[in-house]
Amino acid sequence: DVKVTQSSRYLVKRTGEKVFLECVQDMDHENMFWYRQDPGLGLRLIYFSYDVKMKEKGDIPEGYSVSREKKERFSLILESASTNQTSMYLCASSLSLEGGTSSYEQYFGPGTRLTVT
Amino acid sequence: KQEVTQIPAALSVPEGENLVLNCSFTDSAIYNLQWFRQDPGKGLTSLLLIQSSQREQTSGRLNASLDKSSGRSTLYIAASQPGDSATYLCAGLDSNYQLIWGAGTKLIIKP
């Protein structure tokens, strides 16, 4: 089974702090994704990566950056946390961009509930 | 631009009933459709994935169908149980290989 883990289930940070959210997958997946989920807004894609050191902006990249130095690890960085970044953050991975559309099946981690005060 | 809609937003049924959750999409150029389950405060669990060339997929008491021509997918749950209570999300893979998400259906199965 695919396993996607996230470094923290719950996190409380202060406004202006630099925040790191870590995601690790153990199935050699090429693609990794960061979403945020807010009531009434659903899931929104922040950034994704289809290879080591590669990144692409999603729908709402402002205020965030990402890092993928190793294939299994994808980090989301909030350079200066703000209260409007209080949210549930979900990491996902999928196999590859090749091999048919079944390889796009996304597997999710348990989520990190971030509160910025 | 692809849009995905889920109706109803919430559903409450007695235990044991069969039920159908609906997902509609505006653009038939969809590569696959994935159904997920989310328990409160938790991440998403992938339930079923239907590729564009398929019409349905089954896993246990769950059956998902895909009709690209009408822009619809349904998730059928047979013999519902209280443990099925969760939010169910559908997401379609668009031509940019991005998942477009529905807002979810919150399902409550009453014992």
Image (cartoon, rainbow, N blue to C red):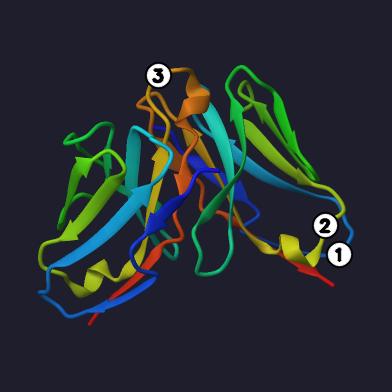
The chain under label 1 reads: B
Q: Position of residue A11 (x, y in %)?
A: 31, 75
Mark 1 vs 2, N-terminal side: 1
Q: Which residue is mark 3?
A: A98
Labelled disc at residue B80: 2
Considering the numbered disc 2 on the image, is that residue within a helix, a strand or a loop? loop
Q: Are marks 1 and 2 in contact (CB under 8 Å)?
A: yes
Give the number of the mark in front: 2 or 3: 3
Tell me where residue B53 sits by quadrant.
top right
The N terminus of chain B appears in which quarter of the rendering? top left
Q: Rounded to the nearest whole Å, what is the CA distance between mark 1 and mark 2?
A: 5 Å
Task: Let me know if marks 2 and 3 both belong to one chain.
Answer: no
Say which residue label 1 marks: B15
From the viewer's side, name the closer residue of A61 and B1.
A61
Circle 1 SS class: loop
Chain identity of mark 2: B
Where in the figure is residue A116, as x and y percent of width and height? 24, 77
- Residue A73 has which mark? none
Q: Pointer 2: residues within 10 angstroms few (<14), some, or many (20+)?
A: many
Q: Is residue B31 visible?
A: no
Q: Are marks 3 and 1 on the same chain?
A: no
> Would residue A79 appear left or right of A37 to someone viewing this image?
left
Tell me if label 2 and label 3 are in contact, CB under 8 Å. no
